[in-house]
Amino acid sequence: MRFHIQTWGCQMNDHDGEKLSGLLSAEGFEAVDSVEEAELVLLNTCSIREKAVHKVYSELGRLREEKLRRPLVVGVTGCLAQQEQAALFKRAPHIDLVLGTMALRQLPRLVAEVQAGRARVMDTTEYPDNHLFPPAVTRRRDTAKALVTITEGCNHACTYCIVPTTRGTERHRPYGDVLAEVRGLVARGYREVELLGQNVNSYAGGCTFADLLERVSEVEGLEWLRFTTSHPMNFTRELARVLVTNPKVVPFLHLPLQSGSDRVLKRMLREYTVAEYLERLGYLGEARTRMTLSTDFIVGFPGETDEDFADTLRVLEDVAFDGSFSFIYSPRPGTPALRLRDDLPMGVKSERLRQLQLRQAELTQASNTRFLGRVIPVRIETHGPTEHGWWLARSAEWKTIHLSVGPGRDLPFGELVPARITLASPHFLGAEPA
Ligand code: 5AD
Ligand code: SF4
């Protein structure tokens, strides 16, 4: 059977796609690049915002048409599957299987049941050992950086967020398992690893997260170590120390702030004030200036006033984030924020988002400009030049690099090469091999 997996959402979901792909490959199924070639299509979904859900339903609509023309098995996995469960079959009766985020290993069984003629099979059980997925099964996409799960689930309860529902409470992989996986990856040629969790900072698989970083960094042959994502309240001094002193841990931190107003943060149940967030950044000391810092913002949260938003812009300015992801608040089913009065016109929300993103673009441009003229190591992320003629690479700070290389010259995929930065735009750095 030929299968195709379409994945939306975060790195965790990306990595789940790699695990699902591995499970099917182990059954002798063949991965193909498009829906058209596939007999089994899995939509590995995200439900963080309504827009993400819309994309899934629109793809499901397309698959219904496809299914009228030929035999096709349609499965839904990921966060929307966990959230909607059997309701998905009502909304889209042509779905054959629904697999929850904590039941990945049940995929082959569900597919076999569909093949045996059973209609509408589902498993959304919260298996307590989902995070112990055997790494040997994972079938990784062709990327220079390998993703490694360290924790699944989240014990915080931000009032806007669907993730505690879709990913459950925290489960941690024992550090020995993490180390064994990283050693295996390095032996296969990977030089960069990203540790994944809905909240890596609260890691408790036999040591602290700071310890885990130190231990993983000792794996010989590993060059760069990164992690995502972090909750400010679990960002410890010890972790900041490792981030600043360990040469393999990249000088990059993504620390979601969400809002610059204490009133809003309180209603979001973020568990910190702006002052406390800034105190955490202060743990980085003067090393902060050598690092790249990014964050997430939600604008238009219920009850956000002009003053609240002005506070957010002020913090953006004061911290001068190198980059940020910002979104208009999207009401999610079953979340506590649904009960808050949300009477701000959409026009106001969009305007706030526009302002924030405009200012961020300028700050990012300034951040990128600081790299001009420098020679830095960058990791080659493509096997050849893109259609525009440059190679894609990434710096340790997670800057996107467009490398212009003379004709006839090949760069080594996945390896570090020195690059001289010649151009700074808000979205990428232009460079040439130094
Ligand atoms: N609406 C808008 N943005 C959201 N995020 C999470 N939930 C919502 C929501 N309901 C954003 C947060 C989070 C990022 C991954 O997505 O900023 O950090
Ligand atoms: Fe989307 Fe959040 Fe699920 Fe990731 S964990 S796929 S961002 S809803």
Image (tube, helix red, strand yellow):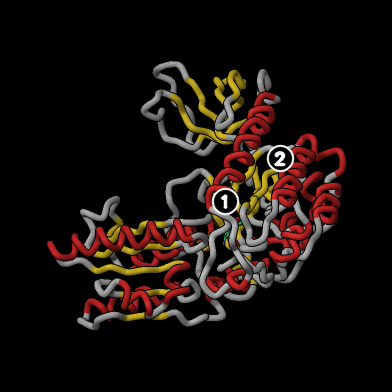
In the rendered image, the vertical position of residue 404 relative to residue 397, given as above or below: above
The residue at the point 64 percent across, 50 percent down is 296
The residue at the point 81 percent across, 58 percent down is 273
Query: Residue 112, image x and y in percent?
Result: 28, 78
| Amino acid identity at mark 1 | Phe
Q: Which residue is mark 1?
A: 327
Q: Work out whether mark 1 precedes mark 2 in sequence or the reverse, and give the earlier one.
A: 2
Q: Which residue is mark 2?
A: 321
Q: Quadrant of residue 196?
A: bottom right
The residue carrying pointer 2 sits among few (fewer than 14), some (14 to 19) or many (20 or more) residues within 10 Å by Cα, namely some
Does mark 1's beta carbon lie closer than 8 Å to ligand 1? yes
Quadrant of the image for the N terminus? Answer: bottom left
In the rendered image, the vertical position of residue 429 relative to residue 348, given as above or below: above
Query: Helix, strand or loop at disc 1?
Result: strand
Does mark 2's beta carbon lie closer than 8 Å to ligand 1? no
In the visual, does 348 lie left or right of 285? Answer: left
Quadrant of the image for the C terminus? Answer: top right
Q: Find the distance from the CA under tag 1 to the CA under tag 2.
A: 16 Å
In the rendered image, the vertical position of residue 172 relative to residue 280, given as above or below: below
Regarding ligand 1, which quadrant of the image does it lie in? bottom right
The residue at the point 32 percent across, 73 percent down is 91
In the depicted view, which residue is nearer to us: 146 or 48?
48
